[in-house]
Amino acid sequence: MYAQMVKSEASTDDPEKLAAFQARIDAGEKIEPKDWMPAGYRKTLIRQIGQHAHSEIVGQLPEGNWITRAPTLERKAILLAKVQDEAGHGLYLYCAAETLGVSRDELTEMLLDGRMKYSSIFNYPTLNWADMGAVGWLVDGAAILNQVPLQRTSFGPYSRAMIRVCKEESFHARQGFDVIRKMANGTPAQKKMAQDALNRLWFPALMMFGPSDADSVHSTQSMAWKIKMNTNDELRQKFVDQTVPQIEFLGLDLPDAGIKWNEERGHYDYSDPDWDEFFDVIQGNGPCNTDRLAARNKAWQDGQWVRDGLLAHARKTAARKVAAE
Amino acid sequence: MAATLTQDEALFQFLLRMGDNTLILGHRVSEWCGHAPVLEEDIALANTALDLIGQTQMWLGLAGEVQGAGKSADDLAFLRDVWDFRNVLLVEVPNEDFGRTLMRQFLFDAWHSIQLGHLMKSSDPRIAAIAAKTSKEVAYHLERSADTVVGLGDGTEESHGFMQAALDYLWPYVGEMFTSDAVDAAMVDAGIAPDPAALRSDYDALILRVLGDATLTVPDSRFAHKGGRTGAMHTEHLGHLLTHMQWLQRAYPGASW
């Protein structure tokens, strides 16, 4: 769920072709870029992969916020490596999207002018060093739950990108847990930071899975196409079930008074996030939306001369080479 | 630096100079995270910063050993004040824009790669080993920064203007890398490190070729701001950098992270 609320496009293609396409998907075949695909499948995937890529790019900002304040050389190196991985994930995902006929620059323009979204989670601030632990542990941990099944998604390039991304993400989640564990077992001030990070990021992490299935209008078609592999509520429950014992292991207080083991269901009960807040964030009113987009716009505008310069040089070099031949 | 400098004191100072250069430049480069002109540059800048921080761990780790006061690389990085830093002024000037950042990187990488080439032959095997390891990374840094300087210098009129302005601003900070003092004399005598002044001709040949390809004009001045590598007088910028970098360690002393 670096891609949330992706609107699934209905298809108006030839019913026979659609049926044959669906049969390939049902048989577990991978769809490759040159294969025939319904226009709706293509559009939905561009939206989903693009949103995922944008999330990786905007996601550099909340962690970049602490790189210059990392408390040790090793922590700084690990955080740099992690953020570098995320930029790399953005790169593979843009490449996967490009196979569907949209350029990275077009996708970037759509992010910058607000036509495309990125994950709601990156509109929350990172306020203390323990957030660097909580982001890896909770945010990357939640993302992995969604991305592991996406390794089996029907679109070949997306599936292959996910295989590579998942390997690195599991390392990120482990390092995040290592940071938070150190804080939870540290001085009283460090423990306070860890608790504060958990309390602030818990519900935003739950929101990453998207609204409840009952309110999720886009799931059915995407699930039939194997673009979406599990329902939002399934994954959210899995996340809560795996994370609550970790919170207890860390000796931190549960961030939600509604968390309770339900013997009958064999799962933890938990409180719903505030979905009004979620929709506010999606609509641009999260604590950091304006600043995050402004930072990306500034980077893009300030970098225009660099991109133009390098392109002009590449053209001159090519022209000189031709002239010399 | 008094005449009573012992060999270990001189070696400690020399190692601080190496480690503080990579620490402060690594920090500056890491400030770019998420703000680069294009995704490939975000990745490359993070990678460069990561290499430099890794090199810092080696240099300052050895500095702590030589000092013999039980200090780790982290203690040296996070718990010294401005006057104890020994990096050249060039690496502490602010990033300003991508042009200045890459020009600074190039002007430093060129010196760094030549310096490490000599240090690989150091009489101190610990230094020779660090140099051998880091010179591979630095060769790549130099290749990339030189290519970028050429690409932007010989790009559009606008990019040329940015790069010329960057070179003009940074040029007075180049000379400090080639100044020598008692610490250097002690290193030369012991066969540990070369005399900085002796590197200048190789350096000039390298940068003149690249800056020529970049169609840039080298300022006609040898004036050099000094004071970083001796600690006598840093820029105002270093204190601000340290308030960021050292904040957690200073605010929560004794905590383990």
Image (cartoon, rainbow, N blue to C red):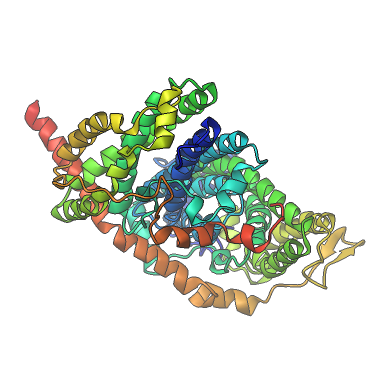
Q: Is residue B194 above or below residue A248?
A: above
Instruction: Give the residue drawn at x 55%, y 64%.
Output: A122
Instruction: Give the residue drawn at x 28%, y 47%.
Output: B103
Q: Is residue A306 above or below residue B61?
A: below
In the rendered image, is residue A31 in sight? no
Q: Farthest residue in the left direction?
A: A323
Give the number of callouts. Answer: 0
**Does residue A111 appear to the left or right of B153 in the view shown?**
right
Q: Nearer the viewer, residue A31 or B186?
A: B186
Percent from the top left, x then y, of residue A121? 58, 65
In the rendered image, is residue A230 in sight? yes
Percent from the top left, x then y, of residue B174? 28, 44
Instruction: Give the residue drawn at x 64%, y 68%.
Output: A204
Q: Nearer the viewer, residue A191 or B13?
A: B13
Q: Quadrant of residue B179?
A: top left
Q: Farthest residue in the front direction?
A: B3
Q: Tell me the quadrant of the picture where the N terminus of chain B can be found.
A: top left
Instruction: Give the residue drawn at x 43%, y 60%.
Output: A12
**Does residue B167 appear to the left or right of B8 in the view shown?**
left
**Does residue B251 appear to the left or right of B111 in the view shown?**
right
Percent from the top left, x then y, of residue B89? 36, 50
Q: Farthest residue in the right direction?
A: A263
**Does residue A203 appear to the left or right of B10 in the view shown?**
right
Percent from the top left, x then y, of residue A305? 24, 56
